[in-house]
Amino acid sequence: MNTKKVVVLALHDELESAYPPLNIAVGAASSGADVILAFSRKGVNILDKLYIPIPSAGIEYLSSAISDFNAPSINELLEIAVEMGVQLYVVDLDIKDSTDLRYPAEQVPIKWILNEAVTADLFVHF
């Protein structure tokens, strides 16, 4: 049986936008897929050690709802993803000294991610 390939692109860093790519990456990795999790210029904030997930205006209740539900935090999901072998990439960004990443991520051009997406069994972006 061939290993499935999943490419996930995280485009935003708001709380409600950070969960879907991480949930899909963890779910796909747990099913045995090879997973690429890439972060855009804004999405890369999720990898920052100082990242605090804040919901968009109008859905401020989301933080407490997630906490009440005992869902894993963004940082916990990211840790699970890394432990499961999800490969992390940062797209078109020069992240030398300005960002202190929680986990190492290779810098690649958007063209590379799109080429990977073409050969993937599943490509999603949030």
Image (tube, rainbow, N blue to C red):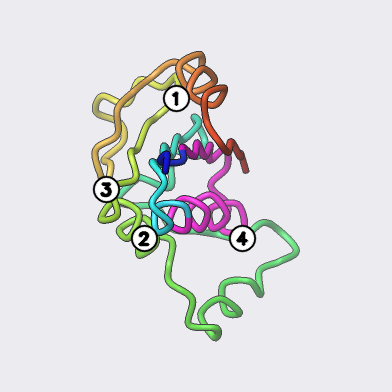
Question: Can you tell which of label 2 and label 4 is closer to the viewer?
Answer: 2
Secondary-structure class at tag 2:
helix
In the depicted structure, whether residue 12 falls above or below residue 20: above
Viewport quadrant of the N terminus: top left
Count of marks overlaid on the render: 4
Q: Earlier in the sequence, mark 2 or mark 1?
A: 2
- Which residue occupies 25% across, 55% down? 83
Q: Which mark is residue 91?
A: 1
Q: Give me the C-alpha separation between circle 3 and circle 4.
A: 21 Å
The amino acid type, in three-letter code, at marker 2 is: Asn
Q: Give me the C-alpha separation between circle 3 and circle 2.
A: 9 Å
Secondary-structure class at tag 3:
loop
Give the residue at mark 4.
55
Q: Earlier in the sequence, mark 1 or mark 3?
A: 1
Dot 1 crowding, Cα within 10 Å, few <14, some 14–19, many 20+: many
The amino acid type, in three-letter code, at marker 3 is: Arg
Give the residue at mark 3.
102
Q: Which residues are magenta?
A: 5-27
The amino acid type, in three-letter code, at marker 1 is: Val
Give the residue at mark 2.
75
Viewport quadrant of the C terminus: top right
Q: Are marks 3 and 2 in contact (CB under 8 Å)?
A: yes
Residue 16's spot in the image, x, y percent? 62, 58
Residue 84, picture quadrant: bottom left
Q: Earlier in the sequence, mark 2 or mark 4?
A: 4
Q: Earlier in the sequence, mark 3 or mark 4?
A: 4
- Which residue occupies 38% across, 19% down? 108
Secondary-structure class at tag 1:
strand
Q: Are marks 3 and 4 in contact (CB under 8 Å)?
A: no
Q: Are marks 4 and 1 in contact (CB under 8 Å)?
A: no
Q: Earlier in the sequence, mark 4 or mark 1?
A: 4
Residue 45, picture quadrant: top left
